[in-house]
Image (tube, grey):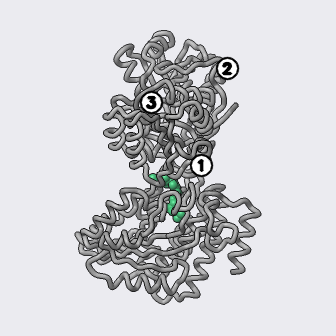
Amino acid sequence: MAKASRLAFGEALAEVGETNPRVVVFDADLSKSTMSMLFAKKFPDRFFEMGIQEANMIGAGAGMALSGMIPFVCSFACFITGRYDTIRMSVAYSKAGVRIVGTHAGIGIGEDGNSQMGLEDVGLMRGLPNMIVLQPADELETKQMVRFLANGHDGPAYLRLTRQTLPDVSPEGYRFELGKGMVLREGKDVTCFASGGTVANALVAANRLAEQGIDARVVNLSSIKPIDVDLIVRCARETGRIFTVEDHNVIGGMGSAVCEVLSEHCPTKARRWGLLDKFGESGTPEGLYEKYELDAEGIARRLAEFVKETPR
Amino acid sequence: MPTAASPTTDVATLKEIARKARINSIKMITAAGSGHPGGSLSATDLMTTLLFREMRHDPKNPRWEDRDRFVLSKGHCIPAWYCLLADAGYFPESELMNLRRLGSPLQGHPDCTVLDSIEACTGSLGQGLSIAIGIALAARVAKRDYRVYCMVGDGEIQEGQVWEALLSAAKFKLDNLVVILDNNKGQIDGPVAEVMPLEPILDKIRAFNWHVIDINGHDYDQILSALDEARTVQGRPVFIRADTIKGKGVSFMEGGIDWHGKAPKKEEMEKAIAELEAA
Ligand SMILES: Cc1ncc(C[n+]2csc(CCOP(=O)(O)OP(=O)(O)O)c2C)c(N)n1
């Protein structure tokens, strides 16, 4: 069912709490927004309200992890990844298995504006050794990632979630696997790598482009680190053009990660789409997606432009 | 000396200005469909007194170098300040209804890059006091006599950076700096006393070597005398704890946390305005 990934996260958290008694959750006065309250209600003894203290929360989470617990620490993406040195030392360097959860990713949050938008978080987290970076595209994938983080993974992790509702995009029977991307639509003229809030729009864009004679492949790149090198190289070889789209600064984000792989393994013409080294602003979520061309029309326009400008 | 803050604005006039600001805050948050009424209403009397009585400033020259500065560290409560800025003549009142709209200088949180009557970009809590300290230190370096006012929230001061700032302002003996704590006792996840207790707050701040004043933040005589007292303090920064009511002036918003970050619906707006007009 179409659902915000933060809501799917809260539901999954309450679920894993039942089977895994080592799961503990922290929040910094945003449990109603991150949806960690769904866990808090069910397991008050394993939920810790830290108040507006993100750095302290991350540190306490590290202590829990170093004592054998499985902590999820939650806040908005911008606030939590903003406590960078704490994450760097107490979590990543210490190999403390803190599951850092950043919700309200990107301009998709709308009216609150730039101060509440996570727009550089992927770049920050990706740059830390030992850290994995995941961004689910829909409810099914979010729930699988939470289960993976609780029961199938031991180490620092960053999970990036949306405020806005995300339509279902994963095929039936989909299984999330760390380090694997998922081809959602085949195509031979160009590959569009999308992640999180832009995946569904990229799919709609690809369908529109088919009417214009452009056959675009769409890949959900939800495992941003580790990244699916083989799939990226294969797509580059097969389609000859690579386009990336994300609700994040193009510098440092998923698109940068894809381009790093391309330039080392299979140099290919590429274009990164997202926020072009800009901060966000206030507006309706729809209005902002239109302005920054992250809605289906915008993505289709930019994809078509790229294909036309780029001979193979 | 150009100044819009007339020392003669009497209390009755201040109250009228505050009433209008509360009404406009409710209207603009309703029109925007999102925003933070609770902490905007609790802060309105304090903000009104600052802009219309205490501070030296000039709406025709927002970046006048000798102006007193106001840093709203709890940036989400900016609607109330926008209303007062409009009333003082910084921009047309019609702009208020564009709050949070695409392209509007009235961003959801204060943005000094698009609105020149804003001193600092805030909205990530815990950062404003450090900025205010820098502004106060700059006055010392540039040998200017402006004063700096910084408003913080009681939830906000749970942030560690605030306590670093409190230490340093005392070290630098910033007697041109006044912090006003809007002590409305609510945050998002619950009452401050439950989420992360602060008490005994005044003892803590005193122990950090600040001059502390404790007032009712809706009582104009107390606000005025606190600001008067603050101007006489030498060699120490001043911390005013203003006891306030979250949602002050609208009965169904008062006291709780439900209206921290929720826009009223049209009927609720009308009810709120009727109450504010009758009060
Ligand atoms: C660093 C940071 N963490 C979390 C938030 C989200 N947030 C916005 S308002 C708020 C509660 C603020 O409470 P308080 O300071 O008491 O403000 P008031 O009650 O006056 O509105 C929170 C947690 C934020 N803006 N910044």
Query: The numbered mark 3 sits on a residue in which chain?
Result: A
Given the image, on which type of amino acid does mark 1 rest?
Lys
- Label 3 with label 2: CB-CB less than 8 Å: no
Ligand 1 under 8 Å from disc 1 Cβ: no
How far apart are the two marked residues, 1 and 2, measured between alpha carbons?
43 Å
Of callouts 3 and 2, which one flags the residue occurring earlier in the amino acid sequence? 3
Query: The numbered mark 2 sits on a residue in which chain?
Result: A
Of callouts 3 and 1, which one flags the residue occurring earlier in the amino acid sequence? 1
Residue linked to disc 2: A211
Residue linked to disc 1: A32
Q: Residues within 10 Å of mark 2 (few under 14, many from 20)?
A: few
Q: Quadrant of residue B206?
A: bottom left
Q: What residue do we see at 68% from left, 33% from top?
A: A2
Residue A193 in the image: above or below residue B198: above
Q: Is B265 left or right of A22, judged from the image as shown?
A: right
Residue linked to disc 3: A133
Residue A270 rendering spot, x and y as whole percentages: 44, 22
Residue A171 rendering spot, x and y as whole percentages: 64, 19
Residue A309 rendering spot, x and y as whole percentages: 49, 22
State the SS at label 3: strand
Q: Residues within 10 Å of mark 1 (few under 14, many from 20)?
A: few
How far apart are the two marked residues, 3 and 1, measured between alpha carbons?
24 Å
